[in-house]
Image (cartoon, rainbow, N blue to C red):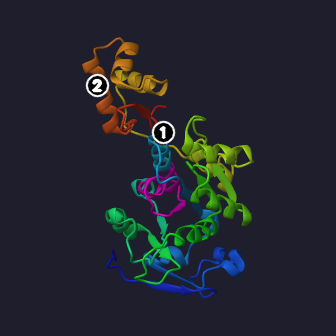
């Protein structure tokens, strides 16, 4: 399904073509087509970009981490690059948009071809404040081979690639290898050793990738330790809500667990958790388990 945004293009080596793509040598795209804010691509700097990739079949943990990384890194002024695939990619884009920052989607088909079709709304939101690019000409539908091929563009655009979740094998690990081949920084988010979608990221860390515990690790690596701080500050919390948030952070993952730990009625625990979710301090997965976000209260 095609979008209606006007398409612009740059030939390899001409003004506006991202110079970091020339690091791909003979594998650099001959032309780059795009929709959205052309000036974002024209002025794109390697050291202000971070690529975030990961599994399409992501866990709730992975989705939460990807969205928070996207939000805090974009809020700190970095451009978030990903592939608009379901799962980690889409979560990273949504986080960047929520952070009021800029994001770039690298597609496998033409830049005016919305894929996945179900992400049409996300596509439109990216065009408003960012850009969608591809080496495929307008109107071309993506094919299975085009996704691993486009991964090299994502790896080349950014000074650092962060893999949030990845099984063995996976397309995200292809992007990771390409980042290393280009002498870019590579980071990986550690995950549970029992999780299949964390096998790839945990292996990357064992092999020397930077462990990414949060956005601050990325900022420290790219900009220097202490140069910029990734801290989302939320609204003030009443003492009871602050106590419930702390219990969730320590592992109380449902109403009953919170009620028991706080010595309050389950109904009161449910209300507190609902309020914390609305304020952005906790999130809930499809199994009804709560987890803390990286948002901090003003007096933290």
Q: In this view, does 92 lie above or below 148?
A: above
| Residue 262 spot, x, y in % from top left | 38, 15
Q: Mark 2 or mark 1, which is nearer the start of the sequence?
A: 2
Q: Give the range drawn in magenta.
A: 69-94
What residue is pinned by disc 1?
Answer: 294
Q: Residues within 10 Å of mark 1 (few under 14, many from 20)?
A: many
Relative placement, left or right, of 28 versus 258 is right
| Residue 146 spot, x, y in % from top left | 53, 72
Q: Distance between the residues labelled 1 and 2?
A: 21 Å
Total numbered labels placed on residues in the image: 2
Q: Is residue 117 above or below residue 111?
A: above
Q: Is residue 224 above or below residue 122?
A: above
Whether residue 273 is in magenta: the answer is no
Q: In which quarter of the image is residue 151?
A: bottom right
Image quarter (top left, top right, bottom left or bottom right) of the N terminus: bottom left
Relative placement, left or right, of 184 versus 157 is right
Asked if one can make out residue 125 in the rendered structure from this viewpoint, the answer is yes
Q: In which quarter of the image is residue 274?
A: top left
| Residue 32 spot, x, y in % from top left | 53, 81
What residue is pinned by disc 2?
Answer: 270
Asked if one can make out residue 227 in the rendered structure from this viewpoint, the answer is no
Whether residue 91 is in magenta: the answer is yes
Relative placement, left or right, of 18 versus 237 is right
Could you tell me which secondary element the residue under label 2 belongs to?
A: helix
């Amino acid at each position: 399904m095609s979008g209606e945004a006007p398409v612009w293009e740059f030939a390899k080596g001409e003004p506006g073509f991202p110079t970091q793509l020339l690091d791909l040598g003979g594998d650099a795209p001959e032309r780059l087509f795009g929709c959205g804010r052309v000036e974002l691509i024209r002025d794109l700097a390697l050291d202000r970009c971070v690529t975030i990739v990961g599994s399409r079949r992501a866990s709730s943990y992975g989705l939460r981490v990807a969205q928070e990384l996207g939000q805090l890194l974009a809020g700190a002024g970095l451009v978030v690059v990903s592939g608009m695939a379901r799962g980690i990619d889409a979560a990273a884009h949504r986080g960047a948009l929520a952070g009021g920052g800029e994001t770039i989607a690298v597609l496998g088909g033409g830049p005016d071809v919305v894929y996945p079709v179900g992400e049409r709304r996300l596509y439109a939101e990216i065009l408003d404040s960012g850009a969608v690019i591809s080496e495929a000409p307008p109107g071309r539908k993506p094919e299975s081979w085009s996704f691993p091929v486009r991964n090299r563009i994502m790896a080349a655009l950014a000074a650092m690639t962060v893999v949030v979740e990845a099984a063995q094998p996976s397309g995200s690990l292809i992007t990771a290898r390409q980042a290393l081949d280009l002498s870019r920084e590579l980071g990986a988010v550690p995950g549970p050793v029992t999780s299949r979608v964390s096998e790839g990221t945990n292996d990357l860390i064992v092999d020397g990738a930077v462990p990414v515990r949060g956005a601050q690790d990325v900022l420290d690596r790219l900009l220097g330790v202490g140069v910029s701080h990734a801290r989302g500050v939320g609204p003030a919390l009443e003492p009871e809500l602050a106590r419930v948030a702390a219990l969730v952070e320590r592992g109380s993952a449902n109403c009953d667990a919170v009620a028991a730990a706080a010595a309050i009625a389950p109904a009161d625990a449910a209300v507190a958790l609902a309020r914390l979710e609305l304020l952005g301090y906790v999130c809930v997965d499809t199994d009804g388990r709560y987890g803390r976000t990286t948002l901090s209260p003003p007096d933290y």
